[in-house]
Amino acid sequence: MLLALVYGVFLVLVAGMAAALALITGSHVSSAMLGTTVAHDRALIGLWADSNLEADELRGGTIEVRRIELQQQLAELASRAGMAHIEVVDSSGTLLFSSSVQQRNSAVANNPDFALAVSGSVAAQLTGAGEATDGGPRFAGPVIHEFLPLIEADGRTAAVVAIWRDAQPMLIQIEAARSDVLILTSVGAGVLAIVLSLIFRAANRRLRIQSRALIETTRRDPLTGMLNHGAAVAALAERLELARGAGASLSMALIDIDGFRLLNETHGHVAGDEVLSTVASLLGKLAPSGCVTGRYGPDEFIVVGPPVATEVVDHVVQQVREGLRKVTVRFGNSEALPITVSAGLASFPTAALGATDLLLAAANAVGEAKASGGDATRTSGAVSSEPAPHPTFNALQGLVIAVDTKDRYTKRHSEDVARYAVFLGRQMGLAPEQLEQLRLAGLLHDVGKVGIPDAILRKPGSLTLEEKSIVEQHVALGDLIVRDLPDIKVVRAGVRFHHERWDGAGYLDHLVGQQIPMIARILAVCDTFSAMTTTRPYRKAMSVSDALKRLGDAGGSQLDERLVASFIKAMDTAADAPRPEDETVRVRLWVPARAA
């Protein structure tokens, strides 16, 4: 009923608008065409009068022969210009000349437009079919009647030229314009009627969709579009009851974004929202249709697998972690930042029997994964995959474990530095005991970072001058930590001086060139290469080729040029050259014919 009412009102409005447009269009077209016609005829008559008439001839001083000649000229002009009839009348209304040789008088003096022309103004009117033209000739159709004054130099009107034209061609064009307006308006009305119908139907569907969406918004997280905390926990409880009733197992996982709080503090909540959306999008793509996914907390997501297939959740978590290694984000002037997650897995009935206990078990597993440095997965109730301490546990092993507990990246980086240092030492022909010292120094060179606050050590952005000063103290702290270990003098030099620069701009002692112990110079080369090829909280890893190029650029300023050249050449030519853990493609950089 509403649609019918709107249609009725709409059609009435369109009909009224069409009629008004037709009238207005006809009036404007008629005025424009009449004005154009009068201007054209005025120009023609002006040219004829200037070329053929004398002032005396307009005052009755024309002999019969001249009068006949002028009337013949008017007849020819009327024929050429498509005029029906022309008269030249003096200001009193007396006919002077006519395009009709037989005509002897004129009766235009009583026409108000004639009086207007006598006063010096141009006038024109449209006469209907069969109407008399003020005593002049009659026409079968409508006529345009024009009055054009002939004005002398002193401003007086010497005569008036009356012109009759067939108005039918003009009226045909006016009617065509009106018809076009009516047709276009009708077509537009039809199109609008169809569009209006479609809009009503679409609006009806939209209202139904919005009604469902309003209900769904109570279950969805506005940022990621995933199930919110309440809906996800409800889905977990529902699936748990189904699994319990069927006597099946069920697996779930909590996924926590590493360093999310520091990311928000460093780059703002907009950056945090982008990272959340990135992880949610990846999780939505990788989770199979049988899984339930949702946003569990500010930086946590939940994955609930289908009953029985407990391995699905673990597979999804591993895929998400692998997928995030290919993702890079930048905020402002920051480096390319990595996104990593820690995950905790728990299963029913192995880890817990209720939904709350299952969530608690998964949360504890997440805590273990984050405590190990993040970017890891832990399973509730599972035996740790980490190697057990050797029975002959000593202080050195304790320091390595302390580094691992503080920051998984630091341990991984230290192990890489140890591998690179031993490799470079072999290229230099060092003795086995020197290689062992290099290995120990590599493992312990960053041990002082156990005393650096997490907010600085894991900050996903550039450090302030004060924060840099704090970080620089890790070499002094590391020196203090290892100084009491037995037979550690050479290793201690590597720990203390591996951040000294060849040009003396390093820290903390600003040693220059050969003043820096050899073990520290070797560690500096390996530490720089590892730092560039390892993903850090504030920057993703470079490729080996880019890292070696930058390493070469640092030779002679930051690093010992001779050691840099040896390392670059060996990395490209040695069969046993160690590669970064995440580097899968060997990129050739070294050209033997060219010196490093």
Image (cartoon, grey):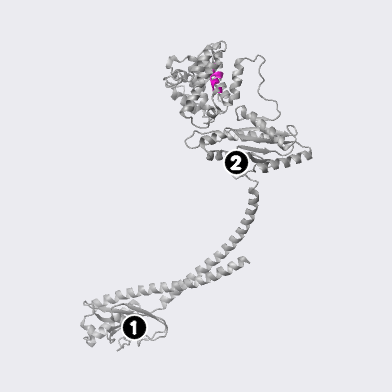
Residue at horizontal 52 percent and vertical 38 percent from the top:
268
Q: Magenta residues, as a range?
A: 441-450
Residue 250 lies in what quarter of the image?
Answer: top right
Image quarter where the N terminus lies is bottom right
Q: Position of residue 120 (x, y in %)?
A: 28, 78
Q: Badge 1: few (under 14), some or many (20 or more) residues near its Cα, within 10 Å? A: few
Residue under numbered circle 1: 112
Q: Is residue 153 above or below residue 409?
A: below
Residue 114 in magenta?
no
Name the amino acid, label 2.
Ser
Image quarter where the C terminus lies is top left
Q: Which mark is residue 423?
A: none
**Is 96 situated left or right of 398 in this image?**
left
Tell me if I can see residue 430 in this picture: no
In front here: 89 or 503?
503
Q: Secondary structure at mark 2?
A: helix
Of mark 1 and mark 2, the one earlier in the sequence is 1
Name the amino acid, label 1.
Pro
Tell me if I can see residue 167 in this picture: yes
Residue at horizontal 67 percent and vertical 38 percent from the top:
303
Residue under numbered circle 2: 281
Q: Main secondary structure of the magenta part?
A: helix
In front here: 549 or 506?
506
